[in-house]
Amino acid sequence: MGVLVFSHEQDVDGIFSAAILKIAFPQSEVFLTNYGLEKMTAAAKTIESKVLEGASTIIIADIGVNEESYMPILRALQYAKEKGCKNIWLDHHLWPDGPRKAIEPICDLVLFSEKNGVKKCASELCTEKFLPDNKLAAQLAAIAHRTDFPDSVKFPIPPLTALISYYLGFPNLRDRLHNVILESVVKGILWDSRMQADVMDASKLIEESIAKSVAAMTSREFLSERYPGGIRLAIAKSESFVNRSILLGRIMDESPVHVAIGFTDDGKVSIRRKDDAPSEIDCSKIALEFKEGGGHAGAAGGFLHAIPEKNGDLAAIAEIVKALESYLSKLN
Ligand SMILES: [Mn+2]
């Protein structure tokens, strides 16, 4: 009977998790989705209708939850369990206690958060759980680890990161996440002529967009007794087809900031911390200052209350400055 896979559409770890699950369950149906109430509500609807059609197993990977967005998925998993489905959720984001306790009784939770400096990405959790002896899965997991944790400087990053964001940024290209990337990765093919052709189309657009974002960037410095040297924040607007890790990484490489926050026209926020920032600065905690926020200490995200395309960029910037102020005041 049918296996349903839900994984994170936005990055290499999410797509590779989906690929590893597809290798483990070749007949499975894969849905790529994202964090937040809107996407979780849509995923819940899909679960409910697929359970009616006879789905037997639901596997969710690389998707974090928060207090504001877990209810629809909780109800859908409850319903699935009542209908005899097996539910499994593998994730490596920080889970708040409330959602974890509510979901635990109806779903096998395979959660991992950083312990003694050991980090695992969702692809590693999927491999350990379902394909511990599969060489391709292990290779994909090692690559995903590298892309999820940029501080592991051992291997080069595959160019897929930029391509995933490019496909996601244009509605007419979105199905290439499935048709071009996922289908190739399942076969162990990480780059082909189609991807190269698309990235050649994309790269000028992406470079121009990054240059525009950097030129229009806003900087702020927060002084306090605890940080007499100041905490420096950069805020940059990003177009939706530009990978935020690449944009914010570029900003952190080129300017002496501790925290870089990107936002999009539709109100998504991405938060990154530079390696030399004070170690107690935790992006996943900063994310809690926003709507539906969550993630990791080094990289996190959420949503603005202001919608820049309606309320203007200044409203977005003001909200981000206030959020960091509020976060830092809690540290003091
Ligand atoms: Mn991940």
Image (spheres, rainbow, N blue to C red):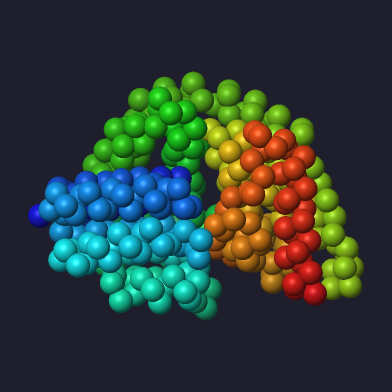
27 to 322, vertically: above or below: above
| The N terminus, quarter of image | bottom left
Q: Is residue 148 left or right of residue 50?
A: right
* Place of residue 87 in the rendered image (x, y in percent of width and height, measured from the top left): 25, 65
* Place of residue 198 in the rendered image (x, y in percent of width and height, measured from the top left): 43, 24
Nearest the camera: 253 or 14?
Answer: 14
Whether residue 159 can be seen here: no
Q: Residue at x 58, y 29 (%)?
A: 206
226 to 15, vertically: above or below: below
How many discs appear?
0
Q: Is residue 314 left or right of residue 32?
A: right
* Place of residue 324 in the rendered image (x, y in percent of width and height, measured from the top left): 74, 59
Whether residue 266 can be seen here: yes
Nearest the camera: 100 or 37?
Answer: 37
Ligand 1 lies in quarter: bottom left
Q: Is residue 48 left or right of residue 13?
A: left
Find the residue positioned furthest to the left: 1
Nearest the camera: 136 or 308?
Answer: 308
Nearest the camera: 201 or 304?
Answer: 304
* Occupied quadrant, residue 160: top left
Q: Residue at x 30, y 59 (%)?
A: 76
Q: Residue at x 49, y 47 (%)?
A: 156
184 to 25, vertically: above or below: above
Q: Residue at x 59, y 56 (%)?
A: 291
* Place of residue 75 in the rendered image (x, y in percent of width and height, measured from the top left): 33, 63
| The C terminus, quarter of image | bottom right
